[in-house]
Image (tube, rainbow, N blue to C red):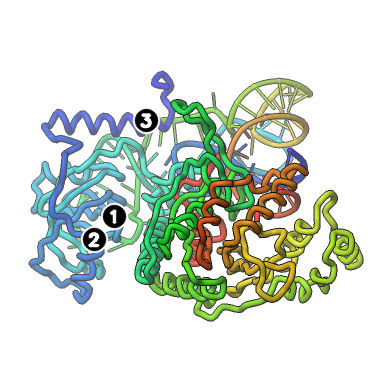
Amino acid sequence: MADRADGADDLLEARRRKLESLRAAGIEPFPHDFDGVEPIGVVRSAHAGLSTGEETSDRHRVAGRLAARRGQGKMAFLDLVDRSGRIQLQARVDELGPEGMDRLVGLDLGDLLGIDGVAFMSRRGELTLRVESFALLAKSLRPPPEKHHGLTDVETRFRRRELDLIANEEARELFVVRARVITAVRRFLDGEGFIEVETPVLQPLYGGAAARPFTTHHNALNREFFLRIATELYLKRLIVGGLERVYELGKDFRNEGVDSTHNPEFTMLEFYEAYADYEDVAARCERLVAFVASEVGYEGEVDLSPPWRRETLPDAIRARTGIDIMEASDRESLAQAMRARGLAVPEDEGWPKLVDELVTKHVEPTLVEPTFLMDYPVALSPFAKRHRSVPGLVERFEAYVGGMEIANAFTELNDPDEQRRRFEEQRALAGAGDVEAQPYDEAFVEALEQGMPPTGGIGIGIDRLVMVLTGRRSIREVVLFPAMRD
RNA sequence: GCCGCCGUAGCUCAGUUGGCAGAGCAGCGGACUUUUAAUCCGAGGGUCGCAGGUUCGAAUCCUGCCGGCGGCACCA
């Protein structure tokens, strides 16, 4: 590549030349530290009341990336950006001397810079630091994205997220919000008596969700492991163990397609509480989301405040399609009812999949306001407890916001014999070719035999929650490094 | 996996009917003491995603491949 002089090489060579001339002048282009830096945002708010042209004697030390430069000669203005904001610097030859001026103005856009300067409000009403001294903190050897249009190419933004973060303030702000969402979740649950736990990511057997796993190999043990698709089964074993209120916040991995709401690795919150049912969990879920929304200053269109709408799944299907799945309770009658209304009937799929089809196609897209869709068919829910009053259903809900599922919860099945039968049903489904059927987990059933209290549990998709709170329509926008093809 | 759209300079984008590859920013050389996307002068910078094909001639038309986006399928 060195033997081809294209535009990029020219740009790189220019920066390399500057690097070498700095070293030749005895300047270390990669110094070790720069102590005592104030965030730019703090400096800005300290001078919020200054009037145009007003001088101060307040000295500030700030550091960041050089983002823009206006003017040369005897005076120039520079923009410095850190995580908290942007501030204008004024470089004057009468302050810095001719050599210092040349060195400061000769820096490249993208260089990391630390300065000491005095605050004043410019004639144009811009808070500015008059540079008294400065230090190059790290030389940038590659050109930054364009200063005005920024970086818009989505592929580059996701593959080279660092450039997105350099160029686009909205990207920086979004991931700060995401971080605050996660701390707020922890603060909420910690405040309600939950303890955070960590269960295996590498699992000898996967379970807790209907999904295909990633597999990997442990060399020393010479055996296959699975990356977890859920934390559910281990967390319920902790409830058996008496931890009473537990949560885990971390990555799950599902070996499935990628689209605007699915990334193969994603952040899941699961929490379980003893002596609770799915109504208790629903109430805690809506309070949690409202708390987090308030903590991050959510101001979106959708009203997230409790109580959320509640609708049973059979009612929801009946209202949208006129089909009563409680009446059409076998495959043939349901298929017939669907055909009678001109709906496509997937071939070779059983009754549960047909119900799932009705929900996905006709109910989910209508659930824009926060909604708990309650009471699912038992066949779709191998870990949920039977409904206390309606045969054939379980006590389960999924929470929807903006037409997107963000949570799934149930009154947990704690009857070990019933759980065994559910696993047997899953085994039958697997035998019939269902690649997402639950593998039989004897260790989990034995844990239930030890005695698990009545328990409510939930999984909340954190990436999707962040999408709701930030108004983004693609999960790739809220995941720092989303999965991409090579 | 299928369908559609897209891929041009470091970045943001033009490119007409198939006829010499363009602009702004950035970079380079120069001028400039109050700028706010600074301005002005000058000279540069290209595997038009990749590989074939059609044609006197392809960024442009055709085929295949790679990558991205959207939709379908899949995915509680």
Residue that carries the numbered disc 3 in the rendered image? A10
Q: Residue A428 in the image: x percent, y percent?
A: 74, 47
The residue carrying pointer 3 sits among few (fewer than 14), some (14 to 19) or many (20 or more) residues within 10 Å by Cα, namely few
Task: Identify which residue is drawn at 47% across, 62% down.
Answer: A271
Task: Identify which residue is drawn at 20% across, 65% down.
Answer: A43
* C-alpha separation, residue under disc 2 versus residue under disc 1: 8 Å
* C-alpha separation, residue under disc 2 versus residue under disc 3: 33 Å
Asked whether the residues under marks 2 and 1 belong to the same chain, the reply is: yes
Secondary structure of the residue carrying tag 2 is helix
Residue that carries the numbered disc 1 in the rendered image? A81
Q: Chain of mark 3?
A: A
Secondary structure of the residue carrying tag 1 is strand
Q: Amino acid at mark 3?
A: Asp
Check residue A236 in the rendering and tell me which mark sits there, or answer none. none
Residue that lies at the very extreme toward the bottom in this rendered image: A307
Q: Residue A39 in the image: x percent, y percent?
A: 22, 60
Observer-nearest of B64 and A66: B64
Q: Residue B52 in the image: x percent, y percent?
A: 71, 20
Task: Please say if the residues under marks 1 and 3 sit with CB atoms less than 8 Å apart.
Answer: no
Q: Quadrant of the N terminus of chain A?
A: top left
Q: Chain of mark 1?
A: A
Inspect this view and state whether residue A147 appears. yes
Q: Chain of mark 2?
A: A
Residue B1 falls in which quadrant of the image? top right
- Mark found first going from the N terminus, 2 or 3: 3
Q: Nearer the viewer, mark 1 or mark 3?
A: 1
Check residue A40 in the rendering and tell me which mark sits there, or answer none. 2
Secondary structure of the residue carrying tag 3 is helix
Observer-nearest of A113 and A212: A212
Task: Please say if the residues under marks 2 and 1 sit with CB atoms less than 8 Å apart.
Answer: yes
